[in-house]
Amino acid sequence: MIHKDYDIIIFSLSRWDHPMSGTCMAIAKEFSRNHRVFFVDRPFSIKDIFQDYESFELKKRLNSILFRNKPFLKVDTGYSTFIVATPGLCLPVNFLPKGHLFNFFNCFNQWIVNACIRRMMRTFKIKNYVYINYFNPVILPVLNNVNPKPLANAYYITNNISLSAYLARHGAIAEEKAVDQTDFILVSSKFQFNKLISKKSNVHYIPNAVDYDFYHSARINSTRMPYDLINIGETKIIMFCGYLSAIRIDYQLLKLVCETYIHFLIVVVGTYEEEDLLNYKLEQISNLIILGNRRYESMPGYMFTASVTIIPYLCNELNKSVYPLKLNEYLAMGKPVVTTHFSEDLDDFSDIIYISDSYDAFIDNIQIAIDSDNDGLKKKRLDTASQNTWKRRIEQMNTIFTNNIPEK
């Protein structure tokens, strides 16, 4: 058993300030309450420099990426701090076919990230630490070529990597190696857990959660309408918060919701694919508002305006392995939730959310959820969310680490 006073190094598929980094950042922030946390950003490649040169995300890091000036940033969460590390410039390799050529150039990228971590370890005198690779098995799935070595390596799986548009080419093979080499496999869905537990004994189910204290505070203090919804008057809102993409969203169902509830506003808050807006002619739907990305701090204010929240996910192989981050956030705002039956993780919430096995059921459940809403149901939702917090998830991870790693 190790002492609980150890550091955490997280290497992520996303960057700390990217809209899609919600779960990973929640883990980093919660760990930072009681541990020193070092978050290593996904590196930029030469291709990114040319394609995204005008982006703010890239410009503010350019000195660190190109010249290695001030590669470490201290981030204040309001209750703790953690360090973000920016690796140097990498090579674009994902387009390469599987084989020796990809392996050769990917080794260079691994060396770049490894060098950043070694410098960080010297700068901050990191000695006892656990390394968590967050769903990026192509680069440094485990961290062994450093001194000192980690107390343990953990690999975190968020969904089916073989169906990921970006990671599928090289990620599936890389993940097999990561699963074999790592000390702990952390998974966020029951599907992934059941898939691996028959082969591996070191698999642990760590589902998504919510910063309940933050949402609770926002809920009791949410009195003002968000600025971009201020002119809607008394119109009721059906809301979806999350990634709007054809690989996840059932657009036919979303359009049916808009057609059926023509006197409601259907509001989508989150990242979206421009191509989908055109392909599915979403811009032609008069009562559909797609707001795009909003800061995490403002999300409770948007959810507060909703009469009902929805998760119109496709029931496909990708979503089967997904535990939606927004589920507990909806519940933490006390909102009724209507969802398709895309994942077995939803079954644990069957007494407080409306799980729909058909289009007709989904459409009907929206009206049922609105008509039957009351203080008793709201309390049940809040109570459930209060049991699914990131604090509890990190306590679970701490127990896994401290009870299963020998003292070194």
Image (cartoon, rainbow, N blue to C red):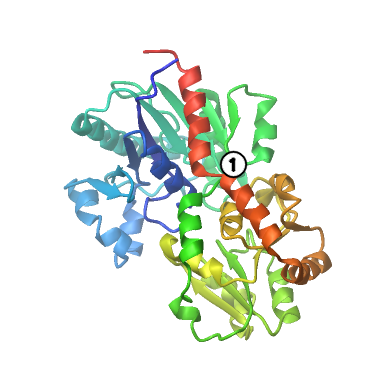
The residue that disc 1 covers is 207
**Few, some or many residues within 10 Å of mark 1 (<14, 14–19, 20+):** many
The residue depicted at 27 percent of the width and 37 percent of the height is 116
What quarter of the picture does the N terminus occupy? top left
The residue depicted at 24 percent of the width and 35 percent of the height is 120
Position of 193 compared to 142: left or right?
A: right
Q: Nearer the viewer, residue 210 or 190?
A: 210
Residue sticking out furthest to the front: 375
The residue depicted at 50 percent of the width and 25 percent of the height is 399
Q: Nearer the viewer, residue 161 or 24?
A: 24
What quarter of the picture does the C terminus occupy? top left
Q: Position of residue 224 (x, y in %)?
A: 46, 75
Residue 182 in sight from this viewpoint: no
Q: Which quarter of the figure has residue 312? A: bottom right
Classify mark 1: helix, strand or loop. Answer: loop
- Relative to 71, is 381 above or below? below
At label 1, the amino acid type is Pro
Q: Position of residue 43 (x, y in %)?
A: 34, 47
- Relative to 255, is 398 above or below? above
Position of 11 compared to 324: left or right?
A: left
- Relative to 262, is 77 above or below? above
Q: Nearer the viewer, residue 33 or 17?
A: 33
Q: Position of residue 128 (x, y in %)?
A: 32, 23
Q: Position of residue 16 (x, y in %)?
A: 37, 50
Position of 31 compared to 346: left or right?
A: left
Residue 43 in sight from this viewpoint: yes
Residue sticking out furthest to the top: 407
